[in-house]
Amino acid sequence: MICITAVRMAAWRAVAVGATVCFLAACSADGGATLGVPSATVATAPPQTTTTNPYAIPEVIDAAYVNRVLAGLDAATSEVIRLVVTTRSIPPESIERLQAIYSEPALFQLRLDLFQDDLRRQLGGYKPNPGANATTVIELLSTTTTCVFAKVSRDASAVAIAPDPRFSIKWIAMKPFPSANRAYNDTGWGLIYEGFERDLTAPRVNPCDAA
């Protein structure tokens, strides 16, 4: 069981401000070398290929790495949005996908509630064939190998018919999420905070410190 402090619950509730009408708008975003041709009489081994994990946590976490993870999380979220929009419901698979993205149960439940609100409003504002949000780092506020907190910009134009620009700036915090279903989220990270305070500003407490 997870103990949730009043401070963290207040922060999560703040995410929903301005978001209850539409989840997507308010809370919802290397050249090669050429080798000489060997002599026909010389046997050569096939080239070795190596696969690197683009989400492996580096020693120094920079904006480029965080943007790569955010792009992966945006892609994972887009699958949930498409399921909800095409089925006009919240099928079990969409719940499993959300659970693989939001590692904090309270934040997962908030996201689920926002989708339910959107369905009650007949999914007004969503494009009929939504794409993916595009979330990019504006500023890294704290970075460790166990938690990242950043100010971000989210472009929802691929998802929303007319995204509200007031909600394009938000704050996210994410932690490694090794137990996530990699079929639905292969980044290895899960979101623990996503949004803003009631006045659309940064959370009063760093979510990584409150985690």
Image (cartoon, grey):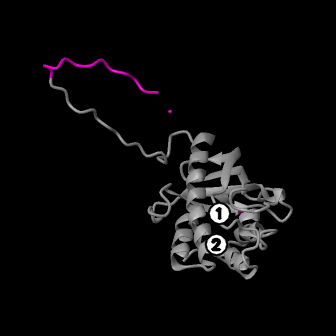
Foreground pick, 200 / 34: 34
Residue with the most extreme right position: 199
The quadrant of the picture occupied by the C terminus is bottom right
Question: Which residue was labeled with disc 2?
Answer: 85
Residue 93 coordinates in the image, percent (x, y): 51, 75
Name which residue type carries label 1: Pro
Q: Which label number is shown at residue 88?
A: none
Residue with the most extreme left position: 41
- Range of the magenta residues? 27-42
Q: Secondary structure at mark 1?
A: loop
Residue 36 inside the magenta-drawn segment: yes
Quadrant of residue 163 in the image? Answer: bottom right
The residue located at (70%, 74%) in the rendering is 114
Residue 111 coordinates in the image, percent (x, y): 66, 71
The quadrant of the picture occupied by the N terminus is bottom right
Residue 202 coordinates in the image, percent (x, y): 78, 56
Above or below for 150 versus 164: above
Residue 9 inside the magenta-drawn segment: no
Q: Predominant secondary structure in magenta?
A: loop
Estimate the spatial distance between the alpha carbons at disc 2 and disc 1, rounded to whole Å.
Answer: 8 Å
Q: Secondary structure at mark 2?
A: helix
- Mark 1: give few (<14), some (14-19) or many (20+) Cα within 10 Å: many
Question: Which residue was labeled with disc 1?
Answer: 130
Foreground pick, 99 / 144: 99
Question: Dots 2 and 1: beta carbons under 8 Å?
Answer: yes
